[in-house]
Structure formats: structure tokens, C-alpha cells
């Protein structure tokens, strides 16, 4: 408080010092990674120098650690509880999943706060700017409680590892101990930043220099969070694609190799983007819940707006996610064909079909929400006729997207088809078709958004016809290019086929960025046919938003399970074998039940966190009356105002 | 209905049929609207649902499995809900006949209501009965077609040989250029060559030898078109792998195929039993070189390329 007062009195130096100290802490991983290996990693100097070859980097190094233990069933303690709790793996699975959920939550919400705060600062209209600022502040309050839950679950996970997987955990700590310490220190730094960020919100809100320092703290908070996550990712990715050890699992003294294993970076990118989508999903669900339980029109209007903003940010992050996922899978295949096939063609392939269904559900939900959102704008009628075309294209693409290559069928059906692959729809089951389908779904979603943007406006720019022609042309070329390449993919070598995804993605991203840029330019000076009547959206759309949040968490449980179980009976792939009595892959039904249980538990916890967030303060929600609305429209924009 | 499907065009054909039907609906809808005789939303939804059902059930050939049919129809139902409830006007229009049926006081509505309220529980009851009644048909099988290969495979180990191939890095020793160097592009270069040309390149000579091995050993099951429809094929269920399908060897590294050929059905991993594969372990009948050559021929003949990573 004293510090904050000093800052408030104009001692800007202090704020810069805090910022500098926090930023300096970020150099910790670099210092440790560059430090002499023996000083940090080796327990004691080896009596005799023994050399080993890195299983991944193929470089030689001095053996500096014990080999991976050859475990037996006795090395895996378990509780004498009824099945499935007698299986330690299920306990670890559930706790790890909850920790990951909350970890993602507290990493993702600050990303949103950072973006929303920056939008607020840069907003020309101070009323709107304040509204964004309040929204960001509200989010941090929620994440503060979630932060404690994450830490508690982290502790619980640590104890579970120590008690139920002692040998495995000892081995992992023998390799990663320097990083584990950095992890803990970064956690401390993140907590400090978070508290200053939250408690300093009002005091640093001077609209000038201090506000910018505050926003920078927000950025720093995210850098801490992401670094933390990347360190933890290296443990998971090491288990999938070990590096820095020889074939016996002996550490070779190179910390960078240990960290920079084959799948680390693809996993980092995928998780950062995934977290943003997930964070958006949580906030979306929060807004929908609050909208549905709102008692006044003003509350409804505010939470409708909140849901829209969060949905927009979640979807903006969702669009690059399939490409990050594609890169991760490509690297998995390149690392081990065996893992790639187990994932996408073998034992776990059916779970990918469920993933496809959930991803399709996301696209449908977003489009549906936008269609419903048009309803709160007078003047949207001319655009509603396009809904059926968008839905048809999305459905056709989804039909291709969810069709498995190998079908679930009875023996009699199999005989009738004459083989495992259906001659017509079986062709939809390979990657080439899937790439075409997912890009089509992305493009239809972009079109929905463009129509949504136009809904309450009459375009006034003189080049409107040219603009429309350019956009239609661009989308037509991108779609034809996408479909053509999807067909071409069947006739060319696999390594070239994989590369085809690039021009497909370029087409989609061009539509996204150029399309939205042209559309936004066309909206300049547009005549408003009516304000957005926040709060006047259908209840159905809010259930849709809630489903969006739940779908994200379900997807995360599913894909997390797939990523982890692809190791089959290995703790660390081909280096450290899992000899526990439960080193088998669960039946799909059982796994799906555990995932759903985890999703349920998470949402119960989350509702508790939301409730706590409300418990602490009862602020009135900001007004959604837009002071810029054109004179003469005569209708306030809050719901019910039009009556 | 099987006759309308042209091999090589079938997936596109299905999408075109769906698109044409959609535009026919849009066109007819527009025509009716211009004459002020629009079909109510509820009727439209039922009509679209039934049309989709007819296409997927009776036009699509061979018939798709029931599990997939349910998935597709579930999707269509969901999309129809999204379509009719996308805006308030359409949603009100859609609900109108339902609400009228539930609340209408004319004898007609009362009759429809009674029939509906009696029929719905009966249908639910029938569905439940149908689900739990013991059946004699074989259950749905969740068969995994692409088993995960091991990291390395030791071939001819039963014969005392101990040649080990690491699947991630091993290469087909006959996929070579004129200098005998491994070449990834050699197949593309000779894709239209005649294997029986006396001046055939080294690669094409190996393809010819591979072809001879294939026709002496494999074609009885995998067929002379390599489409899994050989003379013995239909003695097996499932029938042998169709190499001309873009989802089989075209998706796999050559070493994967080598592993499957050498170890056959009995060599498949345990984590996905039962495999239901009748393929013999060819390492017991062929030499390593013969197996590589047969694989070389399979890729050349189908025009597919093995999966590689750059």
C-alpha cells in the first residue's frame, strides 16, 4: 500500500523498478540453461567418465545421471479402494486434469485481461474505454480465486506423484530438478505480479503513464505465465519424445537438449493458443450464466455484451488452433510413425472422431450465435437469407469432417460394403479431405461474422460495389482453391500433400484478414439502421454460448487423454517402460466417462469460483447505453428500451 | 442405385447430389414464395429431413453402416434446429403448429394431440424394447485398421536370421536410380514406363520382379487390380486391404508396409486385439529382397507414393 501511495504521488521510478525486477526474473531459465551442466545437474562427479549417445539429437555426452529404473508392480503403490480408484493412474489422471484446467484458466484469463485493458486504453470513447476496463478488472478478480485453486491442485498433484508414482517421479526430478526450481520461483514472481496488477488497478488508473505501466505489468504477467507453462510442457513432451538422455535413460548433461525435445515447441504453441480459446470459453460461459440469471435489463445488456466480446476473442484464437494442432500432429508423425498411427489411424483414432464432432459443434455454435445476434440489430433482415447457404456449406463440410475412414459396423454391414472402407464416403476419411473441410468451415464462419458486422449498417462508401465484388471474388477463389487442393491431395506423394495445407491455410487467413479489413473499411461512415440492442438476444443463443464453454473443456479432456495415452506402456517413450499393473490403454467408453467426470467436476469448481467472485463485491454493472447513437433513432440500446 | 456411382468420382458425386438437392429446395421455395404459397417452416424441416434420409439411405450405395447413418441423421436434425431457430420470426413460425397442436381446441387439433401423445410414449417404449431385447446379430465392431507398428522389426528371426529394420529410418533398397542410390523421385520419373521394356531402368526392372512376386503370392487375395478383391477375397471378413484406396498404403511409410507384409496377421501388436487378419507372415515364405520388391510394385502399380517426411 505504501508503495502504491508512493507511485500515486508521482514516483514513477518505483513502478519502473518493479517492472525491471519482474522482467529480470524472466532471465532465470536462460541463466540456468547456460550454466555449467555439472554444477546444477550432476549429483556428484562421476568416478569414471562414461559416454552415451543422445536418443534424439544423436550427440555424444557424458553420462551424468542414473539410468531409467526397471520397475516392477511393487513400485506402484495404490489405495485399497474399489475400482477404478484402486488404479493409481485414474487418481493421477483426475487430479492432473483439474490442475491443468485451472492452470489454463489462470493463464488464459490474464491474456484476456491484457487484451481488453489495452482495448480500453486505446478506445477513443472514454465511456466505452471505462466499460472495457471494468470488464478486464472483473476478470482478474475471478482469476484470483482460480489462482489459489490452481496452486492447491498443483500441490495435490505433486503429492499424488510422490506417493503413487514414487520411482517414476524420482527419475523425472533427477533430470528436471533445475527447471523445477525455476518453475517454483517463476510461480512466486507471477503471484507477485498478479497481486500488484489486481490491487493496483484503481490506483494506477490515472489514464496516463501509470496506466501504461499497469498494462505492461499485465503483459509481464502473461509472459511469466507462458514461461511457466512452457517449462511444465517440457516434462510432458519429454515423456512423449525424450531427448538429452541416452537409450538407457541416463542424463547426458545438456539441459537445453532435455528441454528442447522434438515435441516441445509444437506443444507450446498448441497449448498457448488452446489456453486462449479455453479462457474465452470460460468467460463466455460465465457471461451466458449471468445473462440467463440476470434480474434487470441493464444486467442482461451488460452480460450479453460480455458474452459477445469473450466469444469474439475465443473464436479469434480458435481460428489458428487447427493449424497449430496440425503442426503438432505432423511433428508427432515425423518423430515416430508408430505414435502418429496409434493416434490417427489406430487405437486412439476413434477418439479423434469424437474430437471432430466437438470441433464441428464449436463452429455450428459460433455461427448460430452470430445468426441470433443479428436479431438484436434492426436492419439485419436482408442478410438473414444467407443463413441457409452458410449452414448448408458448413453442414456439407462437417459431414466430410466427421466421416471416419474406418467405419464402426457390424460384421454383416462390413460384408455388404465389401471391405473396411466405404467406396464413397470412405474417401472422406483421409487428411486431404479433412483439410478441405475444416478450411471451408472456417471460411463460412468468417462470412457469418462479416454479415454480422454489416447487420445494422447501410454502406455509404462510393466504392461499395467494388468492395463487394472483391470480397466475393476472394472468397470464391479461396474456396475453389481449397476444394481443388483437397482433391489434388489424393493424387500426389504424401510429403507434397502435407505441404498443400499451406496454400489452403493462406487462402483462409487471407479471407480472414483481408476480408475483415475490406469489410471494416466499407463500414466507414455507414448509416446505422439502428443501434445494437444489447440484451435483446434469444435465450437459445446463451445456451449455445454455455455449450461452447463446455465443449472447450470436453475437447481439452479428450485431447489431453489422447496426447498422454499415445505413449501406451511407456512412461518416457522407448526409454522408461511403465510396468504398473494398469499399463494398458483403457477402453474408449471408460476413458470417455472419466473425461466427462473431469469436465463435470471442473464446472462445479468453476461455478464455485464464479460465486466467490460475486460474493466479494456487488458492483452495479456498467450501463450499455451508447452515447454515440445517432440522434433521431429515439431508442435506448438497453434491452426492453425499445418497448 | 448402385449404377449412378462412377469409380473415382464417387465422393464428389455425393457432394454434388447434396448440393443439387439443396438448390432445388431453395429454387422451389423461392417459386412458392413468389406465389404466396410458402410451405410452413415445420413442414419444410420435415421435408428436408426426409429427403436427406432418402439420399443417405437409398441413393448412397453400398449402404452405409447404421452407426454412421445415426450420426449423419443426428447432424441433419441438429442443423435443421439451428436453421429454424436462427431468428425469432422463423422460430415462431416453426413452433406455431406444435403449439397449436398442444393447445388447439378444435376437434382436429384434439385428434392430432391425442394421437401424438399416445404415439410418442409408444415409440419411446418401442425404442427401449428394441434396444434391450437380446439379438442374434453380431455386435458393432470397433476394429482398428491401422495397427501401430513397433519401432524396429527383426525379420526372419524364426529362420535364424537377425536382420533388424528401424521403421523410422529404413528405406526400400530397390527404390533406386540408375546409380543404385536411393531416390524418392524415381517412381514419379518412371510412372508411365513399361516394366517389360528390355531397356527398362533399374527401378523398372525391380518393379517387374516385384510384380512377378505379387502375382505369384499376393494377388489371390489382394486382386490383380490391387483392390482387395482377389479370387479368395470374399472368403474373408473383412476382405483384404484395398491398395488402390487412398487410405491404405498411400497413407503409410514404406517400412510400415514392410512390417505388415513380413509379420502378417500373427505379428500384429496386442493392444488392439482381435485383429481379424488372415495375412500370413511372409517372412516365412519370401526373402527380405522379395518382400521389398513386391512393395515397390504395389506403389508403382497403384500410383500412390509412400509417406515420407522432410
Image (cartoon, rainbow, N blue to C red):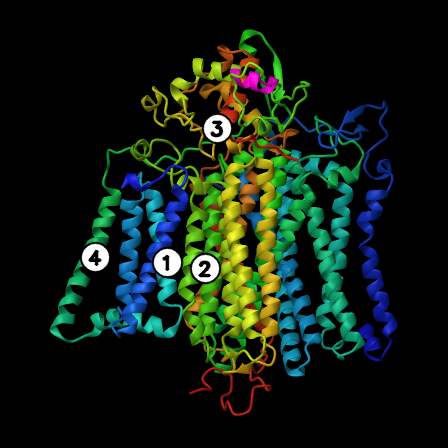
Please give left or right for residue A539 compared with residue A22 in the image. left
x 57%, y 49%: residue: A97
* Foreground residue among A193 and A546: A546
| Residue B156, horizontal then vertical, whole percent | 55, 12
Instruction: Place residue B50 in its image quadrant.
Output: bottom left
Q: Callout 1: residue from which chain?
A: B
x 57%, y 32%: residue: B307
Which range of residues does the magenta coloring cover?
B200-208
Nearer the viewer's eye, disc 3 or disc 1?
3
Mark 4 or mark 1: whose residue is earlier in sequence: 1
SS for callout 2: helix
In space, the residues marked 4 and 2 are separated at their CA atoms by 31 Å
The residue carrying mark 1 is B78
Please give left or right for residue A600 compared with residue A21 in the image. left
The residue carrying mark 3 is B302
- Indicate whether residue B202 is drawn in magenta: yes
Within 10 Å of disc 3 (Cα), the crowding (few <14, some 14-19, many 20+) is: some
The residue carrying mark 2 is A364
x 44%, y 52%: residue: A398
The residue carrying mark 4 is B121
Amino acid at each position: 500500500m505504501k508503495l502504491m501511495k508512493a507511485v500515486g504521488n508521482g514516483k514513477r521510478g518505483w513502478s519502473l523498478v518493479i517492472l525491471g525486477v519482474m522482467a529480470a526474473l524472466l532471465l532465470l531459465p536462460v541463466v540456468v540453461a547456460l550454466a555449467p551442466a555439472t554444477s546444477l545437474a550432476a549429483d556428484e562427479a562421476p568416478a569414471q567418465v562414461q559416454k552415451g549417445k543422445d536418443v534424439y539429437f544423436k550427440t555424444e555426452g557424458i553420462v551424468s545421471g542414473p539410468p531409467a529404473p526397471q520397475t516392477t508392480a511393487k513400485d506402484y503403490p495404490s489405495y485399497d479402494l474399489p475400482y477404478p480408484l484402486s488404479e493409481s493412474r485414474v487418481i493421477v489422471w483426475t487430479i492432473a486434469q483439474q490442475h491443468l484446467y485451472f492452470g489454463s484458466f489462470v493463464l488464459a484469463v490474464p491474456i484476456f485481461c491484457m487484451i481488453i485493458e489495452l482495448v480500453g486504453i486505446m478506445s477513443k470513447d472514454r465511456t466505452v474505454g471505462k466499460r472495457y476496463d471494468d470488464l478486464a478488472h472483473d476478470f482478474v478478480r475471478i482469476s484470483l480465486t482460480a489462482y489459489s485453486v490452481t496452486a492447491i491442485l498443483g500441490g495435490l498433484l505433486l503429492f499424488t506423484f510422490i506417493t503413487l508414482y514414487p520411482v517414476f517421479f524420482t527419475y523425472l526430478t533427477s533430470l528436471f530438478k533445475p527447471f523445477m526450481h525455476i518453475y517454483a520461483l517463476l510461480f512466486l514472481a507471477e503471484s507477485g505480479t498478479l497481486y500488484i496488477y489486481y490491487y493496483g488497478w484503481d490506483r494506477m488508473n490515472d489514464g496516463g503513464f501509470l496506466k501504461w505501466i499497469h498494462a505492461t505489468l499485465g503483459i509481464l504477467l502473461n509472459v511469466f505465465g507462458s514461461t511457466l507453462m512452457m517449462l511444465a510442457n517440457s516434462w510432458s513432451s519429454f515423456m512423449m519424445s525424450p531427448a538429452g538422455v541416452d537409450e538407457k535413460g541416463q542424463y547426458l548433461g545438456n539441459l537445453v537438449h532435455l528441454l528442447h525435445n522434438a515435441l516441445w515447441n509444437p506443444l507450446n504453441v498448441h497449448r498457448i493458443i488452446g489456453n486462449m480459446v479455453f479462457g474465452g470459453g470460460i468467460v463466455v460461459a460465465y457471461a451466458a450464466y449471468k445473462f440467463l440469471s440476470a434480474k434487470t435489463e441493464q444486467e442482461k445488456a451488460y452480460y450479453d455484451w460480455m458474452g459477445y466480446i469473450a466469444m469474439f476473442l475465443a473464436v479469434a484464437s480458435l481460428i489458428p488452433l487447427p493449424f497449430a494442432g496440425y503442426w503438432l500432429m505432423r511433428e508427432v508423425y515425423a518423430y515416430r510413425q508408430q505414435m502418429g498411427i496409434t493416434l490417427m489411424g489406430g487405437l486412439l483414432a476413434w477418439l479423434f472422431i469424437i474430437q471432430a464432432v466437438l470441433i464441428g459443434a464449436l463452429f455450428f455454435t459460433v455461427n448460430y450465435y452470430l445468426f441470433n445476434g443479428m436479431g438484436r440489430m434492426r436492419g439485419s433482415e436482408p442478410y438473414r437469407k444467407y443463413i441457409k447457404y452458410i449452414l448448408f456449406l458448413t453442414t456439407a463440410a462437417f459431414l466430410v469432417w466427421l466421416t471416419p475412414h474406418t467405419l464402426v459396423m457390424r460384421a454383416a454391414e462390413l460384408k455388404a460394403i465389401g471391405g473396411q472402407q466405404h467406396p464413397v464416403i470412405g474417401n472422406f476419411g483421409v487428411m486431404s479431405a479433412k483439410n478441405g473441410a475444416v478450411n471451408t468451415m472456417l471460411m463460412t464462419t468468417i462470412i457469418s461474422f462479416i454479415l454480422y458486422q454489416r447487420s445494422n449498417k447501410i454502406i455509404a462508401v462510393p466504392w461499395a460495389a467494388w468492395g463487394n465484388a472483391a470480397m466475393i471474388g476472394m472468397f470464391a477463389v479461396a474456396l475453389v482453391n481449397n476444394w481443388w487442393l483437397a482433391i489434388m491431395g489424393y493424387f500426389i506423394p504424401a510429403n507434397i500433400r502435407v505441404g498443400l495445407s499451406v496454400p489452403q491455410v493462406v487462402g483462409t487467413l487471407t479471407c480472414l484478414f483481408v476480408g475483415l479489413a475490406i469489410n471494416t473499411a466499407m463500414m466507414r461512415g455507414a448509416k446505422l439502421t439502428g443501434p445494437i440492442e444489447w440484451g435483446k438476444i434469444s435465450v437459445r443463443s446463451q445456451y449455445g454460448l454455455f455449450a461452447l464453454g463446455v465443449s472447450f473443456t470436453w475437447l481439452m479432456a479428450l485431447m489431453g487423454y489422447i496426447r498422454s495415452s499415445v505413449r501406451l506402456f511407456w512412461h518416457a517413450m522407448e526409454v522408461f517402460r511403465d510396468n504398473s499393473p494398469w499399463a494398458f490403454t483403457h477402453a474408449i467408453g471408460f476413458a470417455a466417462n472419466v473425461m466427462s467426470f473431469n469436465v463435470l467436476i471442473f464446472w462445479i469448481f468453476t461455478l464455485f469460483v464464479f460465486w466467490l467472485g460475486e460474493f466479494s463485491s456487488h458492483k452495479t454493472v456498467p450501463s450499455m447505453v451508447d452515447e454515440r447513437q445517432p440522434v433521431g433513432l429515439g431508442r435506448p440500446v438497453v434491452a426492453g428500451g425499445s418497448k | 442405385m448402385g449404377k449412378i456411382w462412377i469409380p473415382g468420382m464417387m465422393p464428389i458425386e455425393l457432394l454434388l447430389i447434396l448440393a443439387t438437392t439443396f438448390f432445388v429446395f431453395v429454387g422451389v421455395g423461392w417459386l412458392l414464395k413468389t406465389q404466396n404459397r410458402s410451405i410452413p417452416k415445420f413442414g419444410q424441416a420435415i421435408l428436408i429431413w426426409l429427403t436427406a434420409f432418402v439420399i443417405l439411405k437409398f441413393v448412397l450405395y453400398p449402404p452405409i453402416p447404421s452407426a454412421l447413418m445415426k450420426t449423419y441423421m443426428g447432424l441433419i436434425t441438429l442443423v435443421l434446429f439451428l436453421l429454424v431457430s436462427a431468428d425469432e420470426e422463423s422460430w415462431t413460425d416453426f413452433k406455431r403448429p406444435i403449439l397449436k397442436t398442444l393447445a388447439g381446441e378444435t376437434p382436429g387439433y384434439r385428434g392430432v394431440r391425442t394421437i401424438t401423445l399416445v404415439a410418442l410414449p409408444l415409440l419411446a417404449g418401442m425404442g427401449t424394447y428394441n434396444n434391450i431385447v437380446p439379438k442374434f446379430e453380431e455386435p458393432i465392431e470397433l476394429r482398428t485398421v491401422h495397427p501401430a507398428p513397433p519401432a524396429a522389426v527383426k525379420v526372419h528371426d524364426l529362420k535364424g536370421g537377425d536382420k533388424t529394420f528401424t521403421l523410422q529410418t529404413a528405406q526400400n533398397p530397390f527404390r533406386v536410380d540408375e546409380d543404385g542410390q536411393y531416390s524418392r523421385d524415381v517412381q514419379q520419373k518412371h510412372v508411365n514406363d513399361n516394366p517389360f521394356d528390355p531397356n527398362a531402368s533399374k527401378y523398372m526392372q525391380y518393379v517387374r520382379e516385384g510384380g512377378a512376386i505379387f502375382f505369384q503370392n499376393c494377388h489371390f487375395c489382394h486382386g490383380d487390380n490391387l483392390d482387395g478383391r482377389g479370387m479368395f477375397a470374399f472368403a474373408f471378413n473383412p476382405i483384404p486391404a484395398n491398395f488402390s484406396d487412398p487410405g491404405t498404403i498411400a497413407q503409410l511409410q514404406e517400412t510400415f508396409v514392410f512390417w505388415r507384409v513380413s509379420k502378417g496377421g500373427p505379428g500384429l501388436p496386442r493392444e488392439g486385439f482381435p485383429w481379424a487378419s488372415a495375412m500370413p507372415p511372409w517372412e516365412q515364405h519370401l526373402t527380405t529382397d522379395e518382400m521389398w520388391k513386391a512393395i515397390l510394385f504395389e506403389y508403382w502399380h497403384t500410383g500412390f507414393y509412400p509417406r515420407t517426411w522432410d
